[in-house]
Image (cartoon, rainbow, N blue to C red):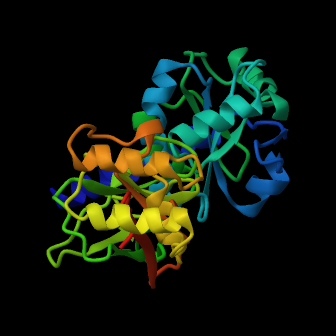
């Protein structure tokens, strides 16, 4: 029985290899990605022994957007463009310029190679839309190009692993670099903060999504592995704090009002940037009687939020960058500040 299975497997491999050898050879093409890097299919990738995986999409395409997290995860699975594969997203529309594609990429935290109309991506898409390599099924569509310049198209997303493997590419497996251990320390001046009042997230810089909440481990520490299944690789990763806590907190009282008043009168100026940041509860970069009034209203229960969208808590800095150091631990820190609390 085992011998029979081995024979069947061997015959399947031969059959697949024959099918691959019969696929058409794609001519060389070039494009410029959204970061201004020029890519020549042959010289930049295939001649380097890399397999190219292309997703044809457009920014406003709902199925493309729904597939984006899965395509990014597949890219990570195959080594995040650091091993045998190069994952790309090329827009099919002439009005999808690089700014639109960049916004799409940032929204989904993509680390694939991306190009819009500025980089002539749509001209490459036209090569496939004319049916030269197989029927065009719309977007998203996927093509796999091996180092031997043969192109497999169309490939359904569920078939990508098999199609990539046929080119000779291998997943990183045990050769993948170890993740970075990220340890986040919070300096909070021994504030007693209710669970869930303040939360920390890993996200892509300058975008709201995707984001992944950093959960304390059994020892109460904010420690996680990056990249990992729970915290996948994203473009320009940063850690930020978010809160919807009420402006009132037991740490803010009349002593804070007195200390801020002395600062305003010039009797005893606030000495640190942390104190000055905490005193400016309306966010106008000034410390004056308006701040005193707003803090007093919060203490008396007349208001439960500070004006102008100022949150109950802020951090200094507002975010910290996550820089990978495979197999090592990086220590990051944020100083948590309770607005209104200056003592």
- Residue 322 picture location, percent across and down: 52, 68
- Judge whether residue 136 can be spotted in this image: yes
Q: In this view of the protein, which residue sits in the foreground, 332 or 102?
A: 332
Residue at position x 24%, y 37% in the image: 302
Quarter of image, res 3:
bottom left
**Vertical position of residue 21 compared to residue 279: above or below:** above
* Name of the residue lying farthest toward the bottom: 328
Residue at position x 83%, y 37% in the image: 27
Q: Is residue 176 left or right of residue 20?
A: left
Quarter of image, res 56:
top right
- Judge whether residue 165 can be spotted in this image: no
Residue at position x 59%, y 52% in the image: 285
**Vertical position of residue 122 compared to residue 17: above or below:** above
- Residue 113 picture location, percent across and down: 67, 47
Q: In this view of the protein, which residue sits in the foreground, 296 or 224?
A: 296
Image quadrant in which the N terminus is located? bottom left
Residue at position x 48%, y 45% in the image: 290
Quarter of image, res 128:
top right
- Residue 337 picture location, percent across and down: 39, 65
Q: Is residue 295 left or right of residue 84?
A: left
Image quadrant in which the C terminus is located? bottom left
Q: In this view of the protein, which residue sits in the foreground, 339 or 291?
A: 291
- Total labels: the figure holds 0
- Residue 55 picture location, percent across and down: 59, 34
Q: In this view of the protein, which residue sits in the foreground, 231 or 186?
A: 186
């Amino acid at each position: 029985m085992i011998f029979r299975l081995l024979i069947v497997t061997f015959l399947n491999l031969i059959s697949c290899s024959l099918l691959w050898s019969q696929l058409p050879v794609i001519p060389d093409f070039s494009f410029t990605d959204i970061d201004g890097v020029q890519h020549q299919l042959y010289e930049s990738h295939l001649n380097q022994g890399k397999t190219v995986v292309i997703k044809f999409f457009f920014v406003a395409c709902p199925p493309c957007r729904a597939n984006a997290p899965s395509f990014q995860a597949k890219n990570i699975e195959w080594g995040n463009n650091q091993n045998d594969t190069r994952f790309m997203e090329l827009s099919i529309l002439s009005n999808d310029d690089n700014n639109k594609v960049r916004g799409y990429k940032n929204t989904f935290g993509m680390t694939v190679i991306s190009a819009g109309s500025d980089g002539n991506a749509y001209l490459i898409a036209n090569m496939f839309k004319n049916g030269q390599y197989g029927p065009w099924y719309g977007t998203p569509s996927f093509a796999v190009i091996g180092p031997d310049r043969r192109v497999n198209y169309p490939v359904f997303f569920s078939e990508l692993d098999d199609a990539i493997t046929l080119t000779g590419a291998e997943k990183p497996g045990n050769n993948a670099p170890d993740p970075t251990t990220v340890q986040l320390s919070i300096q909070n001046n021994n504030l007693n903060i209710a669970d869930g009042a303040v939360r920390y997230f890993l996200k892509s810089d300058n975008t709201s999504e995707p984001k992944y909440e950093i959960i304390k481990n059994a020892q109460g520490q904010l420690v996680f592995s990056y990249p990992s299944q729970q915290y996948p690789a994203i473009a320009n990763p940063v850690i930020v704090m978010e809160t919807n806590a009420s402006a009132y907190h037991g740490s803010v009282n009349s002593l804070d009002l007195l200390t801020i008043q002395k600062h305003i009168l010039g009797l005893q100026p606030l000495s640190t940037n942390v104190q000055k940041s905490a005193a400016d509860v309306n966010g106008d970069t000034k410390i004056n009687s308006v701040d005193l009034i707003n803090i007093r209203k919060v203490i008396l229960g007349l208001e439960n939020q500070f004006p102008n969208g100022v949150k109950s808590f802020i951090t200094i800095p507002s975010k910290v960058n996550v820089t990978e150091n495979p197999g090592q631990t990086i220590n990051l820190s944020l100083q948590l500040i309770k607005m209104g609390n200056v003592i």
